[in-house]
Image (spheres, rainbow, N blue to C red):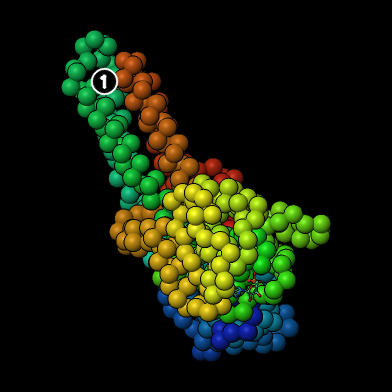
Amino acid sequence: MTDLTIAAVATPLGEGGIGVVRLSGPDALAIADKIFHGKKGGRLGDLKTYRVRYGRIVDPDTGKMVDEALAIVMRAPHSYTAEDVVELQCHGGVVSVQEVLSLCLAHGARLAEPGEFTKRAFLNGRLDLSQAEAVIDIVRSPTRLGLEVAVDQLEGSLSRRMKELKEILYKIVVQVEASIDFPEDDLPEAQLEDIESGILHAMQEVDELMQTADDGKILREGLKTVITGKPNVGKSSLLNTLLDENRALVTDIPGTTRDTIEEVINLRGVPLRLIDTAGIRESQDVVERLGVARSLELLEQADLVLHVLDRSEPLSEEDFEVLRRTRDARRIVLINKVDLPPLWDLDDLGDVGDSPVLEMSLLVDGTQVVNRLADAILGLVGSGSIASSAGSRALITRTRHKQALQQAQQALHNSLATLQQGLPLDLIAVDLYAALEFLGEITGETVRENVLDRIFAQFCIGK
Ligand SMILES: Nc1nc2c(ncn2[C@@H]2O[C@H](COP(=O)(O)OP(=O)(O)OP(=O)(O)O)[C@@H](O)[C@H]2O)c(=O)[nH]1
Ligand SMILES: [Mg+2]
């Protein structure tokens, strides 16, 4: 695959100051030379790496000029992909960049698949897999803290941590291998103890890393925050207040919101994916019923539930139903409309477990609500720890990494059990090698092709 030269538009499609068409592969310079005419003549193929030329893009078949451009030459291995790369900076119009791309394709390049430039960087050994994944996280990062974590990962924070961890395991493997040839009974006790404490140490390190997975996921994807409650309690009003804009329709008709509405806000550095949902109740209306079903589904996946109640209306079975359903969730109970005469008080709610309860009026005091809610949310998700962990050691941000760690941990656990049962040492070695292989999946040494395809398919074309 890597013997072919690929091309793609690397900038977003639309009008812009410039638009970039990127070529990568062994023929990148030759293809660019067919369509790019430098103002002062000369061939791009004769340039050293990191040189720029000003000129024109010309269709070689018709002799017509397509656009003005700058051509940037980056030679292997000193480029993003570690292959020969040419970037053609054209005027940023939808048609002009497409025309330039078409010329590249007509003269020997193949259209790049999503993420293929980064995939080549990985296959050519310029980035490991965790770093390649960080590239997409940088592009998609919802907040500054998320960006910090992604940049650290691109710089190798996770790669270094994995390397340290693998070093620990290699040491144990060496000890085990060296002892395998000993007759069982002659093995010095101290040696077995060394192996045991090595495994325990590795397990502790893996555990520490796994502890960061919750914070990491929140920073990368945002905290999935579902606003729920029965109809007309003020869910959409809450979304609008938090966004500080009239995003969702608000009326006094129960059942106004039917579909879900999702927006991302930045809560003191922590990204919140806010989802306003249809009010939960029995309904004859088909559309509303679908909305309610979707609300219930979202409740199951929520990282955080904001349960809104209306104090100016009697508590009903629907309120208790939502309370029951969200009992085990990370949850904040919001008692709204306290500007109106109350029809019930806190005791009537019964036991809400550890959930913080806030009384508020979205109508009268929106700003204050935002601040109090922010304090409550950040208190609940431990923002202090999120913010500090972002700046310190490597964070696990992906489920894929977490699963690999869990599998490694299981393998280590098995090796420990084998050791403690006094079984032969070569059995321990098998589990240790398995643990190493799982850890290798994170950085990509032992990853399978179909997993790679899935990872890079998440990228945009041109990246
Ligand atoms: N008095 C008073 N009215 C409020 C308050 N918050 C919201 N409302 C009103 O309550 C009504 C319902 O608000 P929404 O935000 O549409 O409620 P909802 O929960 O999204 O309703 P559905 O989408 O139907 O489930 C609107 O008329 C709001 O103006 C409040 O604190 N006090
Ligand atoms: Mg609504």
Q: Is mark 1 within 8 Å of ligand 1?
A: no
Question: Compared to 183, does 100 lie above or below?
Answer: below
Q: Position of residue 2 (x, y in %)?
A: 56, 55
Between 364 and 368, the one nearer to me in the picture: 364
Q: Nearer the viewer, residue 293 or 144?
A: 293
Rendered-image quarter of ligand 1: bottom right
Q: Position of residue 129 (x, y in %)?
A: 46, 52
Residue drawn at the location 37% of the way across and 31% of the way down: 412
Left or right: 120 as drawn, with respect to 169? right
Quadrant (top left, top right, bottom left, bottom right) of the C terminus: bottom right
Residue topped by disc 1: 179
Pick the front one: 224 or 187 = 224
Residue 198 in sight in this render: yes
Give the residue type that dot 1 points to. Answer: Ser
Task: Locate residue 166, reporting x and y percent.
Answer: 33, 40
As drawn, 364 above or below 268: below
At horizontal 67% and vertical 63% (from top left) the residue drawn is 231
